[in-house]
Amino acid sequence: MGMTENQLRLIRALAENRIQDAKKCAIACCAEDNTKKNESIVRRYKALLENGSPTFLELPSNLVGCLLMEDVSGFRESRYYLGIKEKEIFDNIERLYHVGMKLQELGILHLNSTLLYGEPGTGKTMFGKYVAYKLQVPFAYVNFSNLIDSYMGNTSKNLRKVFDFCKGKPCVLMLDEIDCIGLKRAGGSEGSSGELARTSISLMQELDMLTNEQIVIAATNRKDRLDPALLRRFSQKQELTIFPEEEREAMACKFLDDVGVHYNKEEIRSFVIEKKTQADVIQFATQIVIREISKAV
């Protein structure tokens, strides 16, 4: 079987270094392949070609305020400290992401979902961005506290729009402050508590309809408040804690080494000897950068 016209045009465009034309031809080639075997792979790469950067998706106007798309292509991995526990969590997510497409071809649906819980400042959201960067997929961020404040009464409808947009697209879907709507359900169906219960059910239903291509990372400071049925939707549940002292020191040093400013290790040790969160450590390191730059101005 010879090459199709679109395949010939693709080769010609690449040979002549006409990248945008090559992308258009590649999309046309994807449309020509209607085999069941390649369906999921073709859909994935067609979505990437249509949306430009593999780490960014353009947000439709009807989702502004419900969903935030962030381009993570510029993520500073060189100054990001991955803790021992965080590396284990990432390895699990990465392994499932790479076998997910094969599972889908075999007709096995297995949601790549992780619940991160722990006190504020332990880097849950930043970890989600790191996952998206490493796997070269878009980062879609939902903060449920904002969603409910702005859309009370229509939360389920807006939640459905968010999931419909992300469905079928490889991405990290970050569900922050999930305890705002995923509360344990109690009796009664009226008022705000009834609305939250219905929204919690809607969330579980939407999670059930995602495919193996999506990576769901949910974050909460209050795992104890979550509905048991919602907890079962997450294949791994991991607590992120404050780093031990040696990791807090390594985190600060890595950040400052990458920035390239002078610092005193004893000053860092005297700070991290107290139990500080990851956010506190980065704030402290940033103040050192500001101080050293100010000296040179």
Image (spheres, rainbow, N blue to C red):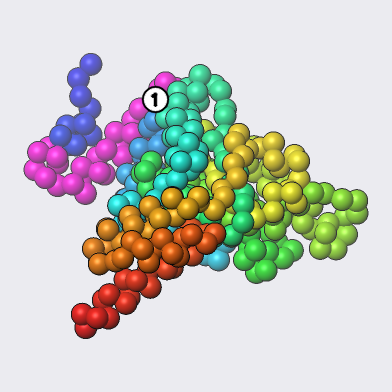
Amino acid type, residue under disc 1 in the picture: Asn
Whole-percent x, y for residue 204 in the image:
69, 43
* Residue stretch in magenta: 12-37
Viewer-nearest residue: 261 or 178: 261
Element carrying mark 1: loop
Can you tell which quarter of the image residue 65 is in? bottom right
Spot the residue most to the left.
16
The answer to if 136 sits in the magenta stretch is no
Q: Position of residue 289 (x, y in %)?
A: 31, 71
Q: Residue at x 59, y 60 (%)?
A: 120
Q: Quadrant of the C terminus?
A: bottom left
18 or 260: which is nearer to us? 260
- Residue that protrudes farthest toward the bottom in the picture: 297
Q: Residue at x 66, y 37 (%)?
A: 233
Image quarter in which the N terminus is found = top left
- Answer with the quarter of the image where residue 193 lies: bottom right
Residue 251 placement (x, y as % from top left): 39, 54
Q: From this viewpoint, is residue 114 visible?
A: yes
Pointer 1: what residue? Answer: 38
Residue 17 in magenta?
yes
Q: Position of residue 181 (x, y in %)?
A: 71, 55
Residue ranking furthest to the top: 1
In this view, 214 is above or below 40:
below
